[in-house]
Amino acid sequence: MPRQYSWVRFNFKDLPKEYRKDYPFSEKEVYIFFGDIPNMPGHCIVCDKYSKFYIGYHTDHFEELSIDET
């Protein structure tokens, strides 16, 4: 699981192709990971660089970026 306030990327590789169009994320975009939602285990809050928040997406679809990728 990514650390709170780390830069993350949405990982499409475990998502079936037929569902990819239903997600608002881009493979090239980076997001700030705000953390898991306490009363919704396995789901998180992320924010893009335009201050748009995404709430309730599966945490395991996000991967933390390395220092070199930020």
Image (cartoon, helix red, strand yellow):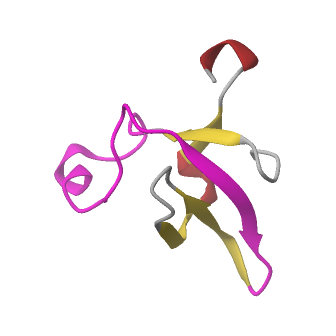
Chain part drawn in magenta? 12-39
Q: Position of residue 35 (x, y in %)?
A: 75, 63
Asked whether, in this view, residue 23 is left or right of residue 34, the answer is: left
Residue drawn at x 47%, y 38% is: 11
Q: Position of residue 8 (x, y in %)?
A: 61, 40
Q: Residue furthest bottom?
A: 39
Number of marks in the rendered image:
0
Quarter-wise, where is residue 22 in the image?
A: bottom left
Whether 29 is among the magenta residues is: yes
Quarter-wise, where is residue 63 in the image?
A: top right
Quarter-wise, where is residue 69 in the image?
A: top right
Whether 31 is among the magenta residues is: yes
Q: Position of residue 10 (x, y in %)?
A: 48, 43
Taking depth in this image into account, of 24 and 57 the one nearest to the observer is 24
Residue drawn at x 30%, y 59% is: 23
Residue drawn at x 81%, y 53% is: 4
Q: Is residue 40 above or below residue 17?
A: below
Residue drawn at x 74%, y 43% is: 6
Quadrant in the picture for the C terminus: top right
Asked whether, in this view, residue 2 is left or right of residue 24, the answer is: right
Magenta segment main secondary structure: loop
Q: Is residue 52 above or below residue 69?
A: below
Q: Residue furthest top?
A: 68
Q: Position of residue 32 (x, y in %)?
A: 64, 50
